[in-house]
Structure formats: C-alpha cells, structure tokens
Amino acid sequence: MVDEISFSLVSILVIMGISLAFAIGANDETLSALVGAGVIKFRIALIVGGIATAFGMILFSQNVGKTVGEDILGSGVKYTDFMLLAVLISSIIWLIIGSLAGIPLSSTHSTVGSIFGVLIVYALSQGGINLESALNYDKLLEVVLGWFFSPALGLLVTFIIFKIVAKFYLSRLRGLNQIEKAEKNFNWLLLVTVIFAEIWVGANSAECIGIFYGIYSSNFITIEQYWISVIICGIFVFLGIFFAGRFVIRNLASHMTNARPSEGVILQSSSALILMIATFLGLPISHSHVIVFCIIGLNLSQKKEIDKKGILKMGLYWVLTFPVAAILAGLLYWIFIFFGLS
C-alpha cells in the first residue's frame, strides 16, 4: 500500500512538473518584440519561438536545474515528495495569476520562493534540523545577487550597445530610403536574435527541470526517467507558449508597434547574452526583469520618457512574488504535515 501511494504521488509530481513547464511557456514574453515589429505572422512566431525555447530547455538547462533541484538545499537535506508537491502547486498558481493578468512574472522568484517557504516549515517541524542547516545560504545568496545584478547589467549593456550601434551605423544613414532599407535588414536579424534569446530563456527558465532533478536526486525516479521528463518538459514549454503565452505576448507587443527592428535586435541581444552567461554559471535569473531593464536602458540611451506607471505595476508583482510564493508553499506544506502526509 505504501509503495502504491508513493508511486501515485510521484506520478502526480511528474504531472505537476510538466504543468509547470507549460506555465513557464505561458508566461514567456520574448516574442513580443518580434510580434510588435510584424516581422512574421503571429502563429509562425509562436511556433518558431516555442521550438527554440524547447530546444534550450532540453539541451542547456542542466546547470540551472541542479541549482534548483539540489544545490540550494542544506547539507544532508533531501526533498520529500510532499515538499516538492507544495513547491509545484505554489509556483503554478502564481504563474497562472500572472498569465491571466497579462503580466510577465518571474518563474525563478516563484519557484525559489516556494522552496524557501517549504524548507523553513520543514526545519521548524523536524527534529534535528535548524534554520541554519536547512538551506545552502551561500548558493541562495548567489541566486539572489544574480536577481539584482542581471537587470542592472541588462540596462548597462543595452545602453552601451545602442550608443555603439548609433555612432558607427545608425547615425551614418542619410535619407528616409536608407533608414527604411536598414530597418528591413534588421527585421531578419531580429528574427535570428529572438530565436537565440528564446534558446537561453528555455535553458535558464528551468525550474521544472529543477523539480525533476530533485525527484531524481531523492531517488524517486531513475536517470532514464529523468531525461524522458526533461524532453517532455521541452514539449510542454512549447505548448505553453503556443496556446497560452499569446496573452502576455500580445499585451506587450501592443506597446511595441512603434519600436524599430534595430531596437529589438539590441534588446534581445543584450538579454540573451546575460541569460547565456547566467545559465553557464548555474544561476536561475528572471528574464522578465532583465528585458524590462534592457528597455529602460534603451530609453535612457535615446533620452525617451520611461513608462513609470507600467514599471511600478510590474515591480509590485515582482516584489510580491518571492514572499507570496514562500508563504503559499509553506502553508501548503504545513497542511500536509498537519494531516500526517509528510
């Protein structure tokens, strides 16, 4: 009977992990610049972007997955099945709220916040475990610092790249014909850079992979089952973008109809570069934070007005994500403990 319950619960965890992959795809906004510029048809953009994201998640997400699924835990601490279930439920609920509101939230903040809340409750409820040993605070500090440094780098890198491109190329264009021709060329370069960016979005938005890494490292599944799950996650992140991501993408794309393709290329190149570096370092960061600060950097470089109201609205959700996810996941896990399930 115990084995049957464990098998059923692990099956639920697998389904929930795959659902998280879908939710990550549903909350991805990378295609907004491409759709706003009208380079290719909306449906084709969803397909191309979804494939690129799935490709990145399957092939390059392992470092970030290991951070979420193992390294952030304290020495000797292993996930239990109900700990993982609480993390998954909390993360998915918050991401769905963001998707329905048309606001790109951080899947990283949501998942790491959920893990934090669960581990705090775990430490308080288990004998021999204290708050100091429940978490790997050095790794957690690296992750949190990455959340602060990555947006700042996005702003700085975008500002510098635009100034360089403007000085050595854009400022030398003469007449409307030259400008229009240059922007048409940037259209196809934008397509390439968005695909490149989506690959690293998939690789870094690997919270679902982290969950499966946690299931594997806790000996609930085999290495073969782990890799099958990774591939399935890639498929479902594609489905999330195609069927549900269109709401966030359309919302942001509607504000980008006047943006030049050259600007989109600069934005996506900057964010992709930062995501790629963070992925190789095994640091899960927020792409939505990075891209918004890239936009701010672009506006500052052009001395344009910044949408402070919109940024404040997104900022409010960002600030709320970690504590709300932590409280929700901690509460769920406490309920499981209260009913003797964990």
Image: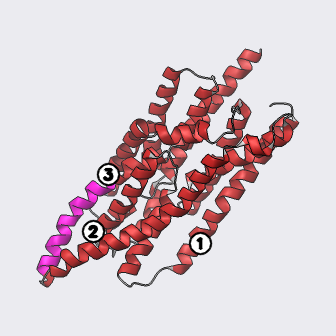
Disc 1 marks which residue?
313
Which amino acid type is marked by label 3? Ile
Picture layout, residue 314 above or below residue 338: below
Check whether the beta carbons of the residues at disc 1 and disc 2 lie within 8 A of each other. Answer: no
Point out the tag, 1 or 2, that comes first from the N-terminus. 2
Report if residue 129 is visible in the image. yes
Whole-angstrom CA distance, mark 2 to mark 3, is 14 Å
The one nearer the camera, 26 or 294, is 294
Disc 3 marks which residue?
195
Q: Is residue 227 left or right of residue 96?
A: left
Report if residue 103 is visible in the image. no
Residue 167's x, y, as percent?
A: 22, 78
Disc 2 marks which residue?
261
Task: Please tell me whether mark 2 sits on a helix, a strand or a loop.
Answer: helix
Point out the tag, 1 or 3, that comes first from the N-terminus. 3
Within-10-Å neighbours for mark 1: few <14, some 14–19, many 20+: few
Q: Quadrant of residue 3?
A: top right
What range of the chain is rendered magenta? 177-195
Which amino acid type is marked by label 2? Pro
Within-10-Å neighbours for mark 2: few <14, some 14–19, many 20+: many
Q: Is residue 265 left or right of residue 121?
A: left
Quadrant (top left, top right, bottom left, bottom right) of the C terminus? top right
Question: Residue 143 magenta-drawn?
Answer: no
Question: Residue 189 magenta-drawn?
Answer: yes
Picture layout, residue 147 above or below residue 316: above
The residue positioned 58% from the left and 27% from the top of the image is 216
How is the structure coloured here?
secondary structure
